């Protein structure tokens, strides 16, 4: 029931408006920081007060807002929201020993500041929600949108995901071994023999409704689970494929969340083995690792379906094929949070 | 379509550690807002808080929760969670089955450990035991792992309406067939982060809060947790049913990041939408558990929105004068209180309103009373204009 009609993405690559994903922008200091647009339609006074997460979240949504004839609500997934502002405020608390503080960073750090700001901008009084379930925040947002569209297929929703790199959460992830200690380039990410990945961030927005006509893709199924047991993941995937692919259909392209962390490779390999006839692609060298990276993968899937072109640098294993119709996204966050998103091509 | 019913409740707040203790305190009009005795803050002597007078270590001991990195937020959640699932007689098998969902809310998560987070965020090696505990999801992931839950788990943060949205989301999951039952609720504990944040916004009162009073001076922060077990009526069999989740609606005020519009469109639309979803009219509502934070902005706007929708408003009160404002837990705690209203057919007094707001003349219920109640509305409004109203009904 959930059809994607349009999508936008602010990422470390050239993905916003004038899209060119054939050229790869390299990480700097193990971080893939987003290329921010000029935000011409946000008044400067408001723009100045926005933290980065709110800025890129609103920025990625604005082109879709402009084109949408009507909107019935905003559904955002973000693990941390405005992390930079959050820790900026935290630092003030400690450094000024709970003295007189300015509330700006506090208000901006609330994760629902992004959806709230979008509601405010559009004077939209409809449904407004923020899912923050770490590496499954965006997946839960998709399920929310699906449920809304099952009840109201005629409605239009903006479904989005935002997470930012902040100096502080970078530090915490580094201390917890989720980011690599050694300097690593995007190109060598999958060839490092170490734990952790490189840091990333993005803001991605989709215009979704229940109308098949002129849609780019349908999200046919979404499944997420919390486990470290490969057998459970394999079973779940088998079940999903059996229930959602008709006989003769196959997964044409697998978008894998492989991220250069040696601890997680076994999960990705297990999934590749099940979708053995699919072209295997990877994207974390474009985005780095963060909790809502699967939203970038969904944007990329829409791009592949629309252009029917797979950039060479994302291919891990090429399988000869005709039209790309079915795409499976498998992502794994920190070894325990797994998700599958199955996507079907609509418009020719 | 089978109705969605509540089969288990659990709560811990500044007025009690269990549902029974909370009910007694509400009946007696007890206020749990006091000087801080456990939480270290510069504001300890300057303003009162709805603090739960149990140390984190004692909670760990009581709950046998000695896993590395467990935070006070997770412990308070666990306390209410255990009460709710035992109340609903959920077996280990029920907890582990793939169609039992957990939807929890928190606005503080592990950020209650403000100093540890500061150190970890600025340190170059080592790191504390809490590296994986700071985010909002850490609470529900802790509960999920402790009970080996295989169903859908989600965390919602829409500021002060978070757990009302978690309840709504759980009900929708069941309705859509994605879960057979959902354990829904929220938690927040006192944190330097929120104390300083709300203080910087100048909405904390140095005195005990006075919801809906003309002279109100702001809110008091509190801590607590509550969970509800939601199931389909047809699946319940011989279990006790507390109430029906009969209506819910979320609407955005789309006016300001941290205050409500004069017209109160968000509150008006969420209340109106909840009525519509419950297929009820305004006159059907027997009582409103108001958001009633005792800030100048909220209480005036909420009163105006109630007048606009109801004309003559039903009896209402805010339990924030008992517990303080528990942020991400408030919607769930007040859902439990609304269910107590229905179950026992009684209304608890709103405390400390001596002089009704001049512009509206609305006064919360002043004394405990037995009353015939069929449908209760519970309001929760948060930053970002996020407004949610829930309706609970007798079976």
Image (cartoon, helix red, strand yellow):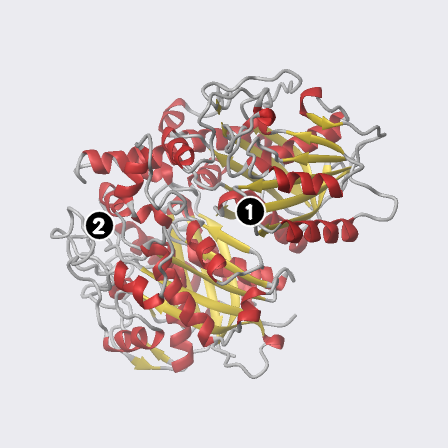
Q: Give the mark toward the camera: 1 or 2.
A: 1
Query: For the residue labelled by badge 2, is the local secondary structure a helix, a strand or a loop?
Result: loop
Q: Which chain carries label 2?
A: B
Q: In which quarter of the image is residue A250?
A: top right
Say which of B210 and B81 sits in front. B81
Rendered location of residue B269, percent (x, y): 47, 54
Query: For the residue labelled by badge 1, is the local secondary structure a helix, a strand or a loop?
Result: strand
Q: What residue is pinned by disc 2?
A: B204
Q: Quadrant of residue A171?
A: top left
In the figure, B114 relative to B298: above or below? above
Residue at figure coordinates x 36%, y 47% from the top left? B260
Residue at figure coordinates x 59%, y 37% from the top left? A294
Residue at figure coordinates x 12%, y 51% from the top left? B46
Q: What residue is pinned by disc 1?
A: A337
Q: Are marks 1 and 2 in contact (CB under 8 Å)?
A: no
Say which of B315 and A223 sits in front. A223
Say which of A337 and B293 sits in front. A337
Residue extending farthest to the left is B45
Rendered location of residue B30, percent (x, y): 22, 72
**B68 relative to B101 in the view: left or right:** left
In the figure, B202 relative to A287: above or below? below
Rendered location of residue B387, percent (x, y): 43, 53
In the figure, A175 relative to B247: above or below? above
Rendered location of residue A80, percent (x, y): 43, 40
**A300 relative to B25 in the view: left or right:** right
**B221 relative to B266 in the view: left or right:** left
**A122 relative to A70 in the view: left or right:** left
């Amino acid at each position: 029931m959930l059809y994607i009609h349009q999508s936008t993405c602010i990422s470390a690559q050239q993905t916003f408006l004038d899209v060119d994903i054939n050229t790869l922008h390299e990480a700097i200091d193990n971080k893939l920081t987003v290329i921010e647009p000029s935000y011409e339609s946000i008044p400067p006074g408001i723009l100045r007060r926005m933290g980065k997460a709110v800025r890129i979240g609103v920025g990625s949504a604005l082109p879709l807002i402009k084109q949408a004839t009507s909107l019935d609500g905003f559904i955002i997934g973000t693990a941390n929201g405005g992390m930079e502002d959050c820790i900026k405020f935290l630092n003030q608390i400690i450094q000024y020993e709970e003295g007189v503080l300015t509330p700006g960073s506090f208000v901006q750090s609330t994760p629902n500041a992004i959806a709230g700001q979008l509601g405010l901008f559009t004077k939209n009084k409809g449904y407004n929600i923020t899912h923050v379930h770490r590496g499954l925040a965006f997946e839960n947002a998709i399920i929310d949108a699906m449920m809304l569209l099952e009840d109201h297929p005629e409605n239009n929703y903006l479904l989005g995901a935002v997470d930012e790199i902040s100096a502080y959460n970078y530090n915490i992830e580094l201390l917890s071994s989720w980011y690599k200690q050694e300097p690593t380039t995007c190109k060598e990410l999958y060839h490092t023999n170490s734990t952790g990945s490189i840091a990333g961030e993005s803001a991605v927005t989709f215009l979704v409704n229940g109308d098949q006509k002129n849609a780019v893709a349908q999200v046919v199924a979404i499944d997420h689970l919390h486990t470290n047991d490969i057998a459970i993941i394999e079973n779940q995937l088998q079940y999903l494929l059996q229930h959602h692919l008709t006989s003769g259909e196959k997964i044409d392209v697998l978008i894998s969340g492989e991220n250069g962390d040696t601890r997680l490779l076994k999960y990705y390999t297990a999934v590749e083995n099940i979708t053995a006839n699919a072209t295997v692609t990877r994207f974390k060298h474009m985005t780095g690792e963060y909790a809502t990276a699967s939203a970038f993968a969904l944007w990329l899937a829409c791009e592949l379906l629309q252009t029917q072109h797979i950039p060479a640098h994302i291919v891990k294993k090429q399988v000869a094929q005709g039209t790309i119709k079915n795409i499976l996204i498998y992502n794994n966050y920190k070894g325990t949070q797994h998700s599958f998103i199955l996507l079907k091509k609509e418009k020719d | 379509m089978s109705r969605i019913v509540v089969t288990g409740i659990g709560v811990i707040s500044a007025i009690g550690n269990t549902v029974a203790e909370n009910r007694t305190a509400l009946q007696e009009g007890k206020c749990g807002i006091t000087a801080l005795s456990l939480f270290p803050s510069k504001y300890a002597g300057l303003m009162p808080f709805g603090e739960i007078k149990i140390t984190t270590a004692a909670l760990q001991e009581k709950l046998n929760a000695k896993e590395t990195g467990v935070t006070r937020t997770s412990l308070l959640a666990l306390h209410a969670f255990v009460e709710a699932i035992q109340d609903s007689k959920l077996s280990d098998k029920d907890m582990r089955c793939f169609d039992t969902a957990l939807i929890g809310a928190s606005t503080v998560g592990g950020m209650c450990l403000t100093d540890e987070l500061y150190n970890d965020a600025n340190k170059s090696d080592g790191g504390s035991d809490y590296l994986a505990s700071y985010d909002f999801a850490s609470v529900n992931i802790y509960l999920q792992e402790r009970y080996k839950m295989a169903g859908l788990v989600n965390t919602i943060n829409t500021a002060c309406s978070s757990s009302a949205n978690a309840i709504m989301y759980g009900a929708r999951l069941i309705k859509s067939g994605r879960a057979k039952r959902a354990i829904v609720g929220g938690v927040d504990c006192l944190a330097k982060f929120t104390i300083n944040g709300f203080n910087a916004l100048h909405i904390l009162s140095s005195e005990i809060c006075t919801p809906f009073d003309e002279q109100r001076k702001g809110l008091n922060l509190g801590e607590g947790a509550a969970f509800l077990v939601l199931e389909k009526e047809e699946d319940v069999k011989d279990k006790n049913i507390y109430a029906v989740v009969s209506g819910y609606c979320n609407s955005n005020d789309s006016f300001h990041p941290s205050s409500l519009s004069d017209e109160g469109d968000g509150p008006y639309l969420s209340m109106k939408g909840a009525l519509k979803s419950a297929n009820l009219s305004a006159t059907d509502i027997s009582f409103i558990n108001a958001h009633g934070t005792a800030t100048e902005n909220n209480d005036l706007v909420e009163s105006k929105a109630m007048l606009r929708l109801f004309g003559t408003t039903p009896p209402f009160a805010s339990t924030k004068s008992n517990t303080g404002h528990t942020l991400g837990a408030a919607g769930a705690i007040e859902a439990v209180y609304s269910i107590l209203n229905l179950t026992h057919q009684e209304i608890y007094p709103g405390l400390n309103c001596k002089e009704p707001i001049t512009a509206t003349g609305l006064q919360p219920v002043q004394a405990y009373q037995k009353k015939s109640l069929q449908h209760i509305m519970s309001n929760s409004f948060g930053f970002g204009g996020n407004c949610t109203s829930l309706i609970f009904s007798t079976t």
